[in-house]
Image (cartoon, rainbow, N blue to C red):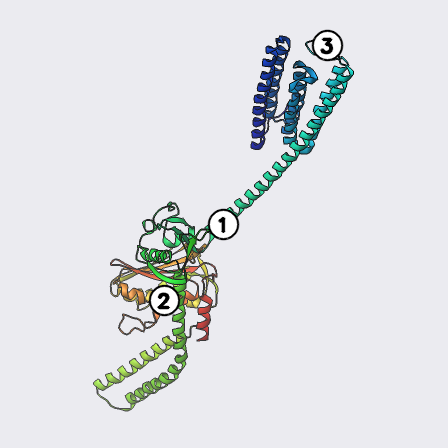
């Protein structure tokens, strides 16, 4: 019968190798000792027979191992070896003196094998088989059916009685050996199962701890007493700017993380004082000059006996929190502005209308010279300008909540370009171009407000280029993170590029603040209104400027994305104004 090869379990492979090795060693020692004993007694015939038995043991061992490699069941092979060993031991007893041989106790070794691999049942069955073989051999020997190689043995009544006692003792020893070996085998197996279960639990705990450590949103850094890094999770690497591929364990903290001296001082202070610091905020500066606010807690790392081993720092990046604080403070200012806007409208607009109307009447009723007429025209123009400023101010402070719908951004930009080109805002010596990477890009937005954003930024670009220059507007889709650690989402990116006068660093920091302007006669509300509309659409707007060009970049999500923390709260505050 052919046995198909199969994948051999590592555990079974180890067991069979161990059994074969022990079997060969023990068989060689036992049979070798028997051969030496028989040769000392000049019993050459029996020694030759034992040589033959040793060969049988070697051949059977090789055959069993070959069967194992061919895929035979491990338990069946062990049972086969036990049967062969019992038969060989019976023959060794026969050739070494019969039932009175000193090698009869070797049955116990085979019984131990049965008990070890098959527990109590295996040990008991093997002991009964050994006792049965020994008893049958003794009875056959008593009846003269089998004879010792040295010749016949005549048994007296005393011989029979002694043989029966000897057989009973052997039976008791064999059965006891089987029960004991099976019992201890079961205990060992049970202990192994308990250990394996404990190891599995420990490994699971380690896996869970490692999973938690790697997936924490907060940064975790552990230092030893020499300020060397014991461990650092991925969030800490991301927050502190350490590349994922860099090996940091065992390296000094200040050698791995540059420019974080204040953080290291905080950790050293806790380590030396032995007093942990609860949640507090610290301001760090990255090597590139950007500020990094952290909310951090620092604790001591101690052993089970309380011995100081290092420090543990748990921290979070508060950049977005600080940004939201600024937005909320800004919203609070806008709320205060909104409260006085209605009063301003009534208190200023009515006198302005009276002044403008009275001046118009005086122009018609009085006969004034040219200089006074110019003064009256100036009063009317400035009154109209002031009225327009108040109107723009009220529109900014009482901006309505966006009404979202699907908007074709490309069409909005084309119409804005057409409006600018055919208006008086762009000089003939200036050029305005528009490019779109991909057709039909749509976003969920308030179309009227988005058009206002485009118009305000385009007009600002026209003022920047003044009498000579180029303005380019381009549109495409990009993927960016919505926040720190968030998944990438798709945005429509609109850029307004002009080669006019650059914007200084100081002005760029204030360019979207209400009432900030560098233009004579400007209100400072055009870009502020644009920025506020973009924020209400969960988008982003920023400006870059150098000696060659100025770029206003707008990002508007292609879906109605409201995942940014605090946007709804700010919108609600705008709604209440």
Q: Is residue 320 above or below residue 31?
A: below
Q: Mark on residue 526? A: none
- Rendering quarter of residue 356: bottom left
Marker disc for residue 455 = 2
Q: Position of residue 134 (x, y in %)?
A: 71, 21
Residue labelled with disc 3:
152
Task: Compare residues 22 and 67 and report the one nearer the observer.
Answer: 22
Q: Is residue 127 above or below residue 328?
A: above
Work out whether 23 lies above or below 271.
Answer: above
Looking at the picture, how far across and down is residue 202, in whole percent?
53, 45
Which residue occupies the foreground of this view, 423 or 339?
Answer: 339
Q: Dot 3: within a 10 Å radius of its alpha carbon, few (fewer than 14), some, or many (20 or more) residues?
A: few
**Which residue is denoted by mark 1 in the rendering?**
209
Left or right, residue 54 beside residue 399: right
Which mark sits nearer the N-terminus, 1 or 2?
1
**Which residue shows up at 27% across the image and 70% down it?**
519
Seen from the viewer's position, the closer of residues 330 and 518 is 330
Q: Is residue 126 visible?
A: no
Mark 1–mark 2 distance (CA, rounded to whole Å): 55 Å
Q: Earlier in the sequence, mark 3 or mark 2?
A: 3
Between tags 1 and 3, which lies in front? 3
Q: Confirm or deny contact between disc 1 and disc 3 (CB under 8 A).
A: no
The quarter of the rendered structure image containing the C terminus is bottom left
Q: Position of residue 547 (x, y in %)?
A: 24, 59
């Amino acid at each position: 019968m052919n046995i198909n090869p199969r994948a051999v379990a590592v555990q079974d492979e180890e067991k069979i190798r161990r059994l074969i090795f022990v079997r060969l060693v023990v068989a060689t020692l036992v049979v070798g000792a028997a051969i030496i004993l028989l040769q000392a007694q000049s019993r050459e015939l029996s020694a030759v027979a034992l040589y033959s038995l040793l060969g049988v043991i070697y051949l059977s061992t090789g055959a069993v191992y070959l069967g194992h490699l061919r895929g035979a069941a491990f338990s069946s092979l062990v049972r086969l070896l036990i049967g062969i060993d019992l038969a060989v031991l019976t023959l060794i007893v026969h050739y070494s003196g019969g039932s009175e041989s000193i090698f009869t106790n070797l049955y116990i070794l085979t019984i131990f094998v049965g008990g070890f691999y098959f527990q109590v049942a295996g040990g008991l069955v093997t002991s009964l088989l050994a006792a049965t073989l020994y008893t049958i051999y003794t009875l056959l020997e008593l009846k003269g059916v089998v004879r010792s190689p040295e010749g016949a043995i005549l048994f007296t009544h005393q011989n029979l009685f002694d043989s029966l006692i000897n057989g009973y003792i052997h039976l008791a020893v064999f059965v006891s050996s089987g029960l004991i070996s099976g019992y201890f085998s079961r205990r060992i197996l049970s202990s192994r199962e308990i250990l394996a279960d404990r190891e599995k639990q420990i490994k699971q705990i380690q896996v869970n701890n490692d999973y938690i450590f790697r997936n924490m949103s907060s940064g975790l850094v552990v230092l030893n007493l020499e300020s060397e890094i014991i461990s650092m999770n991925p969030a800490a690497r991301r927050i502190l700017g350490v590349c994922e591929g860099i090996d940091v364990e065992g390296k000094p903290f200040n050698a791995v993380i540059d420019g974080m001296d204040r953080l290291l001082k905080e950790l050293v202070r806790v380590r030396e004082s032995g007093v942990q610091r609860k949640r507090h905020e610290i301001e760090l500066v990255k090597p590139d000059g950007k500020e990094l606010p952290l909310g951090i807690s620092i604790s001591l790392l101690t052993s089970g006996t309380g011995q100081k081993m290092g420090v543990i720092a748990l921290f979070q990046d508060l950049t977005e929190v600080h940004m939201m604080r600024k937005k909320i403070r800004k919203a609070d200012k806008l709320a205060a502005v909104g409260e006085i806007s209605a009063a301003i409208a009534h208190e200023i607009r009515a006198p302005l209308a009276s002044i403008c109307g009275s001046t118009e009447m005086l122009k018609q009723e009085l006969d004034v010279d040219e200089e006074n007429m110019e003064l009256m025209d100036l009063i009317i123009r400035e009154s109209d300008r002031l009225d327009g400023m108040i109107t723009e101010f009220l529109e900014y402070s009482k901006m309505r909540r966006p009404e979202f719908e699907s908007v074709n951004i490309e069409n909005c930009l084309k119409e804005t370009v057409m409006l600018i080109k055919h208006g008086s805002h762009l000089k003939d010596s200036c050029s305005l171009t528009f490019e779109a990477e991909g057709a039909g890009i749509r976003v969920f937005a308030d179309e009227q407000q988005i058009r206002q954003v485009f118009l305000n930024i385009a007009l600002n670009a026209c003022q920047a280029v003044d009498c000579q220059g180029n303005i380019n507007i381009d549109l495409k889709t990009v993927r960016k993170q919505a926040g720190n650690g968030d998944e990438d989402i798709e945005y429509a990116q609109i850029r307004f590029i002009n080669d006019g006068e650059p914007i200084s660093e100081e002005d760029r920091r204030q360019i979207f603040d209400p009432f900030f302007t560098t233009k004579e006669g400007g209100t400072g509300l055009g870009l502020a209104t644009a920025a506020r509309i973009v924020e209400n659409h969960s988008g982003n707007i920023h400006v870059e400027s150098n000696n060659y060009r100025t770029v206003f970049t707008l990002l508007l999500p292609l879906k109605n994305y409201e995942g940014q923390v605090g946007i709804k709260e700010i919108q609600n505050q705008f709604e209440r104004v």
